[in-house]
Amino acid sequence: MGRTKGSSESDAGIKAGRSRKDKRNPSEVLGLGGEALAAMSDLEADPSLSDSSLSDSSLSDSSLSDPAADEPVTAQSPFNDTDDHDARQITLDPTQLYLNEIGFVPLLSADEEKHYARLVQKGDEAARKRMIESNLRLVVNIARRYLHRGMSLLDLIEEGNLGLMRAVEKFDPERGFRFSTYATWWIRQTIERGIMNQARTIRLPIHVVKDLNGCLRAARELTQQLDHDPTTQEIASRTHKTATEVSRLMGLNERVSSMDAPLGPNSDSSVAETIADEHGCDPSEQIQDDDVHDSVAHWLDELSEKQREVVVRRFGLLGYDSCTLEEVGQEIGLTRERVRQIQVEALKRLRRILERQGLSADALLKQ
């Protein structure tokens, strides 16, 4: 039967309405506010974030329930009609681009999770991809809680995504709990392990990091209870370790700084310039040594030939290697005792020569 004019106009109105909906901002499509994500870039400057130590979580439905599963990750439009420069900066921000991208993926209902999870168990790659993409916002919400641990937000998200993929492979829909509850444990575990492996300039073994975190946690708890910084012995009693072990672990928590780092924001001096050289010599002694080195050949010419041979070989002067009395004797054909006697005579004569010029024989023999 033919369609009436009124029905045609109605269909046209529906299509126009859909077209207008499709052109809405992503945050409007998802029902999300734009201000939450705008504040996300300020998280790294927020000193109030918890710095709780890393810990292993036990897998249970109640303990793994994470409010992050129900928190939306909001997205802002990267375009600003009034400021093209700011728009380009926002568009080029990798975190903003990533959040805009995952904001278009719809979440799964409980029935859909079970359906896709059963398909994943059968090896369906498309179902696996759908479950991963639908839970990327869960990873972001969990990753934000681990800021200020030595890794950027994008690195934390990357580690968490590895845990999400593992959770999709291991999830059993017949156990009766939601996927977000199960995936939270895997996401937290991979993020925490990533922090242990990458956050420090000098990498520590994971078991050492866990022991160190236990000591730091005990120190924070004791500080709150005792109203003063706990001693090493108090921390050792709380963690059931020896004081020596606690001292060693706490020493690993010292901050690492570059030797080339400037002393201040407006300083041209580096840290290395403020550290004393323990092996450096006094400038006056260095000048004296240089003068002695230039005059060595002249002073040695005032010795007899035998004395000169013994001194230069015995003390390694003029390019010779330092030798023992016996080795010098073998080289010049004399006994060890005779070499010693010649050495004593030569040194006495050298001291008189150097004293006349205000120098010491030690400066010569160091050359």
Image: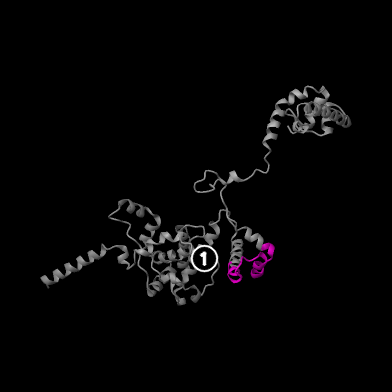
The residue at 69%/30% (across/down) is 290
The residue at 67%/44% (across/down) is 278
Question: Measured from the top left, where is residue 251 in percent x and y?
Answer: 63, 58
Residue 357 visible in rendering: yes
What residue did someone put label 1 on? Answer: 189
Q: Nearer the viewer, residue 27 or 358?
A: 358
**Is the N terminus in the top left, top right, bottom left or bottom right quadrant?**
bottom left
Residue 128 visible in rendering: no
Quadrant for residue 102, please give it. bottom left
In magenta, the rendered stretch is 220-245
The residue at 80%/29% (across/down) is 351
Question: Measured from the top left, where is residue 363 in percent x and y?
Answer: 75, 32
Amino acid under disc 1: Gln
Residue 233 magenta: yes
Prevalent SS, magenta region: helix
**Is the C terminus in the top left, top right, bottom left or bottom right quadrant?**
top right
Q: Nearer the viewer, residue 353 or 358?
A: 358
Residue 322 magenta: no
Question: Measured from the top left, where is residue 364 in percent x and y?
Answer: 75, 31
- Left/right placement of residue 264 relative to residue 302 reads left
Figure disc tally: 1
